[in-house]
């Protein structure tokens, strides 16, 4: 039986479908001196980074903010990436990965690590294997070109969430860290990526105000504070469960804090500040 091939769903919409043009877009995100790192990878700083929070809007809006996280991990060594994001369409299982297969992109293809996916699923009772759940969503797809641009050889485990409750984040985050620890003992190395945008469609000042409070709780790696702040400020971060899951996993693996590298809104980028979406690049170190 041939391997499942996951076709891009937002290629040509969120980013260019042309290889050369997409490489140019990525270069522009990295060299942007206002919202991006202002330089091309690899970084000249090598330190232990367990994971990142990265946005998933069109590259025109969030690409430069996203480039900060990828620049920082561009000198890290890892051969497996666990990507966690929100299911925007509610398709399929509430917590879904894929058993195997290949994720296609205009600049290359990435293989799923089937055994690692199975190892995580065996520890997370809520997780299913469901390719349909991933078929339309952009949240993990837009991370793939950044990874291919900055990293040589890696396999992925894509996880998409409809259920983003705190108990799920605790269970899934622990399942990920337990499986990862077993693989680390065999010599493998990992990167965790939480795909999420922050406040949606509010004024620029409100987005900055609300998101700054939520980011404080992320930097502290305090899951209870994170969910409390999410509710108290009514923050419409779409991938809050993905962030929380990676917070749990990163902390279990040894991270002691988060580090905000860049925050900006679509309004900061485009100048239209009437109704914006917030984006952040955060490291777990």
Image (cartoon, grey):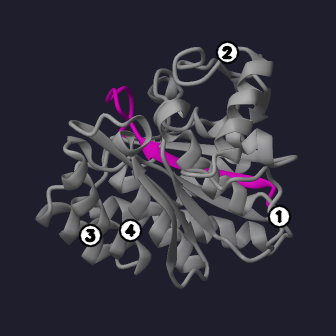
The spot of residue 185 in percent (x, y) is: 79, 75
Q: Main secondary structure of the magenta part?
A: loop
Of labels 4 and 2, the one closer to you: 2
Element type at marker 3? helix
Q: Nearer the viewer, residue 146 or 128?
A: 146
* Up-down relation of residue 144 to residue 118 (above or below): above
Q: Is residue 254 left or right of residue 28?
A: left
* Up-down relation of residue 10 to residue 98 (above or below): above
Of labels 3 and 1, the one closer to you: 3
Element type at marker 1? loop
| Residue 17: image tag | 2
Of labels 1 and 4, the one closer to you: 1
Decide: few, some or many residues near mark 1? Use Cα within 10 Å; few <14, some 14-19, many ≥20.
some
Labels 1 and 4: the sequence-earlier one: 1
The CA span between labels 1 and 2 is 28 Å
Q: Are marks 1 and 2 in contact (CB under 8 Å)?
A: no
Q: Are marks 2 and 3 in contact (CB under 8 Å)?
A: no
For mark 4, what is the residue? 170
For mark 1, what is the residue? 77
């Amino acid at each position: 039986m041939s391997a499942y091939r996951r076709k891009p769903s937002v290629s040509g919409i969120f980013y260019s479908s042309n290889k050369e043009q997409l490489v140019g877009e990525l270069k522009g995100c990295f060299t942007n001196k206002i919202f991006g790192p202002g330089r091309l990878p690899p970084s000249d700083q090598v330190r232990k980074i367990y994971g990142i929070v990265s946005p998933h809007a069109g590259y025109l809006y969030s690409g430069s903010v996203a480039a900060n996280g990828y620049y920082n991990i561009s000198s890290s060594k890892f051969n497996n990436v666990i990507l966690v994001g929100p299911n925007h369409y509610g398709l399929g299982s509430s917590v879904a990965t894929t058993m195997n297969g290949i994720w296609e992109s205009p600049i290359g293809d990435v293989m799923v690590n089937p055994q690692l996916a199975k190892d995580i699923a065996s520890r997370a009772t809520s997780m299913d294997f469901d390719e349909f759940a991933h078929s339309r969503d952009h949240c993990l797809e837009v991370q793939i070109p950044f990874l291919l641009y900055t990293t040589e050889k890696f396999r992925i485990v894509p996880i998409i969430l409809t259920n983003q409750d705190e108990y799920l984040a605790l269970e899934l985050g622990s399942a990920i860290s337990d499986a990862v620890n077993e693989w680390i003992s065999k010599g493998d190395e990992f990167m965790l990526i939480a795909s999420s945008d922050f406040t949606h469609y509010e004024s620029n000042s409100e987005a900055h105000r609300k998101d700054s409070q939520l980011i404080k709780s992320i930097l502290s790696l305090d899951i209870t504070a994170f969910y409390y702040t999410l509710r108290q400020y009514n923050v419409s971060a779409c991938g809050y469960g993905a962030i929380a899951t990676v917070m749990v996993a990163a902390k279990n693996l040894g991270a002691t804090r988060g580090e905000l590298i860049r925050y900006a809104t679509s309004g900061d980028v485009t100048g239209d500040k009437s109704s914006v979406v917030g984006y952040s690049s955060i490291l777990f170190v």
